[in-house]
Amino acid sequence: MQKLAILPPLLLCLISSLSTADGAASAASTAGVWEKHQYSFVSMGFTSTYSCEGLADILKQLLIAAGARADAKANSGGCAQGFGRVEPLARADLIFYTLSPDSSKAADSQTLEGIWRPVTFAVRSPRQLMLGDCEVVEQFRAQVLPLFTTRNIVDHTTCVPHQDSGSVIDLKFESFSAPLSAPSRPR
């Protein structure tokens, strides 16, 4: 009989902890607003060279993986060698939106709920990222990632110029972004 008397308090404890967990999950989302960014990215690596179109493709993948809105654009920019040809200094013009926490607390249609999402850049994460892209990841981290709202950045990326051997892509951070199921544009 004593065992049955203990059961109701245990159930009550379990139920209250579940409701606390639900409250914590809803508190984890924060109102956010989209901010537009434009940036001209010039690849200055020694190991890999890119056509302007190839650089633009890699950068678009990195933008979206880092939490930019799905309509991010990376356009090849003013390349002297022509379409599809390797450039010594390949360039891409980036136009993208990042989600920033909305401190105004204004309830208007331009805000949406944002979450902190873990992001990892490594070989094959995003899928087409290769070890030869190490220097582009380093440049992205230094030049473009500061335009995102991020936290807990852990960067163990090491790029050895002129060779893949010894290079490591290992960049982890949390990005404030829209939930994957949320609409990507404000209504």
Image (cartoon, rainbow, N blue to C red):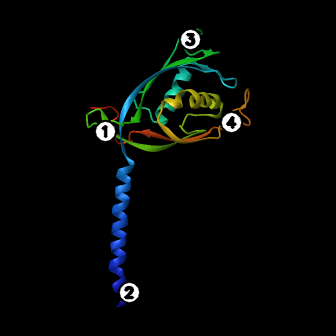
Q: Where does residue 21 sit, x and y in percent of width and height?
A: 38, 59
> Residue under circle 4?
158
Q: CA distance from mark 1 to mark 2?
A: 50 Å
The residue positioned 60% from the left and 31% from the top of the image is 137
| Residue 102 x, y percent position in the rendering | 36, 36
Which is more N-terminal, label 2 or label 1?
A: 2
Of label 2 and label 3, which has the lower sequence position? 2
Q: Find the distance from the CA under tag 3 to the CA under tag 4.
A: 28 Å
In this view, the residue in front, 165 or 43, is: 43
Q: Earlier in the sequence, mark 1 or mark 3?
A: 3
Task: Indicate left or right for 50 with 76 as reference.
Answer: right
- From the top left corner, tell me how far across and down residue 72 is, in percent: 43, 27
Q: Specify whether 96 is left or right of 15.
A: right
Cα distance between the residues tagged 2 and 3: 77 Å
**Mark 3, other Cα within 10 Å: few <14 / some 14–19 / many ≥20:** some
Give the structural element (helix, strand or loop) at label 2.
helix
**Amino acid type, callout 2:** Lys
Q: At 57% across and 29% down in the image, what residue appears?
A: 140
Label 2 – label 4 distance at C-alpha? 59 Å
Q: Secondary structure at mark 1?
A: loop
Tell me which corner region of the image, top left, top right, bottom left or bottom right, holds residue 49.
Answer: top right
Image quarter for residue 136?
top right
Amino acid type for the residue under numbered disc 4: Thr
Q: In the drawing, does residue 114 fall left or right of residue 147? A: left
Q: Quadrant of residue 9?
A: bottom left
Contact (CB < 8 A) between labels 1 and 3?
Answer: no
* Image mark for residue 105: 1
Measured along the vertical axis of the image, is residue 85 above or below residue 130?
Answer: above
The residue labelled by disc 3 is 79
Classify the position of the C terminus by image quarter. Answer: top left
Q: Which residue is mark 2?
A: 3
